[in-house]
Amino acid sequence: MADNKGVMIFGEIAEGNLSSITTELLGCGRKLADELGQELNAVMIGSGVSGLAQETIAYGAEKVYVVEDQMLADYQADSYVAVAEKVAKEVNPAIILLGQTSMGSDIAPRLAFRLETAATLDCVGLEIDPDSKRLLQTKPVYGGNAQAVYVMETDPQIATVRAKSMSPLEKDGSRKGEVINIEAGLDPSVIKAKVLEKVKEEMEGVKLEDAAVIVTGGRGIGGDEGFKELEELAKLLKGATGATRPACDNGWMPDKAQVGLTGKIVTPDLYIAVGVSGASQHMAGCSGAKTIVAINKDSEANIFKMAHYGIVGDWKKIFPAFKDKIKELVS
Ligand SMILES: Cc1cc2nc3c(=O)[nH]c(=O)nc-3n(C[C@H](O)[C@H](O)[C@H](O)COP(=O)(O)OP(=O)(O)OC[C@H]3O[C@@H](n4cnc5c(N)ncnc54)[C@H](O)[C@@H]3O)c2cc1C
């Protein structure tokens, strides 16, 4: 344990750029590394990723380990975990951070197993304990109804971080750092699965996970017509429209709009919940919103326990005036 030093983040690329979770990991990793008085390293795995190394430095990394290989062009657990294990064993960090993304949550537990340590998934808070210097890892538990703080006894301490729960640093092109190329050294026989086809999801407007404002409807909306009104408000606020599971199950909204335990986890600045009861499985997906506004006709609805602002009444009567006022404020 004593030989492990520094913080390492695993970067991800979205459309040729550092993904937003990567800059958030760098911001959080920088803070943890400074508290420990140690280095922040980043690992970029893929094909054609070396061009992003300087940008990684500009967002806070001191060293960037670049692993370029044609065999790493597509994310594939077998190859990426093998490379992650190789780099982690060479660098020996005390802390490894990944995004709570499909890639990060796939790699983290496998890597933990190979490094004979543990991983905490979906952290929303990370701090260094001032006495023990161990990583305090906060994550929601019991469907988002409580938060637990985990401390690991083994190194490296591996955690995945929920999107939007950490802030990136300002990009600073004058930051200096070192870029180190590492051979992937992959044995093609370890790769057991192949990517046969990629299908790009058709997207209109802002992606739910990236939206600063989300207007979500529940069963109380009563049908797809009602959702058109919510969509109008979401567009006005340059946001996205979300839905509860019953609203998706009823076919009023597509499944990809579902927020919650079995849907998307979102952390917008503003979450407007209309006709949503606030069941724990739904709140697990939106409790990280900075401000929650609820409209519900039942004053006893659970959503009012979580909302910062609440309006009790029939949404059909309230919503037109609510929308008009917002229109007036944003125009
Ligand atoms: C394992 C598991 C996973 C789940 N995952 C998810 C998940 O990911 N996401 C999710 O959303 N749910 C999930 N659920 C379902 C969850 O438990 C709730 O059933 C669901 O969130 C309730 O959705 P709702 O609030 O739309 O409906 P309801 O609970 O039926 O609430 C409707 C609300 O609308 C209000 N209302 C009705 N009419 C009006 C009106 N005219 N004006 C204003 N208010 C009105 C009512 O007062 C009520 O509070 C999961 C459940 C399980 C067991």
Image (spheres, grey):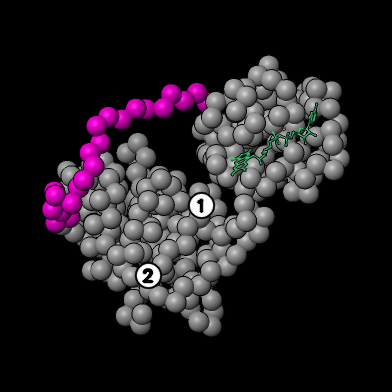
Q: Which quadrant of the figure contains the C terminus?
A: top right
User: What span is colored magenta in the figure?
Assistant: 184-205
* Disc 1 element: loop
Q: Which mark is nearer the camera, 2 or 1?
A: 2
Q: Answer with the quarter of the image where residue 292 lies.
A: top right
Q: Disc 2 residue type?
A: Thr
Above or below, comparing residue 264 to residue 122 in the picture: above
Query: Tags 2 and 1 in contact by the CB under 8 Å rule?
Result: no
Above or below, comparing residue 78 to residue 33 in the picture: above
Above or below, comparing residue 276 to residue 115 in the picture: above
Q: Confirm whether residue 177 shows in the render.
A: no
Distance from disc 2 to disc 1, alpha carbons, whole Å, reads: 21 Å
On the rendered structure, is 309 left or right of 187? right
Q: Which mark is residue 117?
A: 2
Along the line of sight, the residue nearer the viewer: 214 or 103: 103
Q: Main secondary structure of the magenta part?
A: loop
Q: Residue at x 43, y 63 (%)?
A: 119
Q: At which x and y percent is residue 288?
A: 62, 50
Residue under label 1: 162
Q: Answer with the quarter of the image where residue 62 lies.
A: bottom left
Q: Confirm whether residue 305 shows in the render.
A: yes
Q: At which x and y percent is residue 200?
A: 37, 27
Along the line of sight, the residue nearer the viewer: 69 or 194: 194
- Whether residue 194 appears in magenta in the rendering, the answer is yes
Quadrant holding ligand 1? top right
* Disc 2 element: loop
Q: Residue at x 86, y 40 (%)?
A: 299
Q: At which x and y percent is residue 60?
A: 40, 59
